[in-house]
Amino acid sequence: MGVQSVIFFSLTLLFCLKAEASHCSTHGREQHAGLRLVKNISELPQDNYGSPGLSHITIAGSFLHGIKEVELWLQTLAPGWRTPINRHSCEEVFVVLKGSGTLYLAPNSHLEYPGQPQEFPIFTNCTFHAPVNEAHQVWNTNQDEDLHFLVIISRPPIKAFIYDDWFMPHTAANLKFPIFWDEQCFQTPAKDEL
Ligand SMILES: *[C@@H]1O[C@H](CO)[C@@H](O)[C@H](O)[C@H]1NC(C)=O
Ligand SMILES: *[C@@H]1O[C@H](CO)[C@@H](O)[C@H](O)[C@H]1NC(C)=O
């Protein structure tokens, strides 16, 4: 697997900030900005954020669309690719639309580091959640098929702590805020309405 499967490199998004900034919501004013209520998911912006094995679409976003309590992503991992090991204090529910893989979960938030994770096979039409503050990783371990899944999180925007490995102390995990797909709209904070 090696280097090829490590995803989420540092980002060079600056070049597209200007072009896409108009997609960002400003304090729930999106209806005035002419955004449609019913959107075609196939036409929403999609990006890999520097990781060739990832496709991410924010279907309903806090920064992007002014959604306040939940956020919804559609993601695809190519064979062999995986999410970073991460944890967060928001709730996160996954729905696998297609493909299969492995969920790794280390329910050891009370210990110094996550430790050896438990492995759970995941498959088409399954659902699971990442318990609050427990380190987890989703890995497309199926060499023949993409893994498509929906992700619902509570209380956006997400503040994720990312681990290099399962034995990295919780205190050494790196806070990734804003998360990769929130960076662009985070750069253009909402203006207060006077
Ligand atoms: C949604 O977008 C896709 C890709 O552009 C297009 O093929 C499809 O016809 C669209 N659906 C509708 C109902 O417009
Ligand atoms: C997934 O669920 C849908 C809707 O119930 C069903 O049509 C489809 O056959 C299921 N796919 C698999 C692989 O189980």
Image (tube, grey):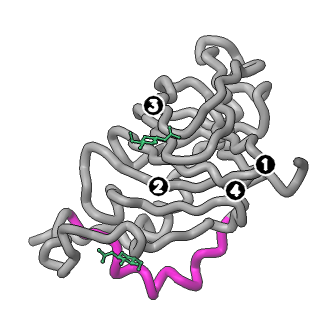
Residue topped by disc 2: 74
Give the mark toward the camera: 3 or 4: 4
Which of the two labelled residues, at mark 3 and mark 4, occupies the earlier sequence position?
Answer: 4
Give the mark toward the camera: 1 or 3: 1
Q: CA distance from mark 4 to mark 2?
A: 14 Å
Give the mark toward the camera: 1 or 2: 1
Residue type at numbered disc 3: Ser
For disc 1, the neighbor class at 10 Å (few under 14, some 14 to 19, many from 20) is few
Q: Which residues are magenta?
A: 11-27
Q: CA distance from mark 4 to mark 1?
A: 8 Å
Up-down: is 27 above or below 170? below
Position of the C terminus by quadrant: bottom left
- Disc 4 to disc 2: CB gap under 8 Å: no
Residue type at numbered disc 2: Leu
Is the C-beta of the residue carrying label 3 under 8 Å from the nearest atom of ligand 2? Answer: no
Residue type at numbered disc 1: Gln
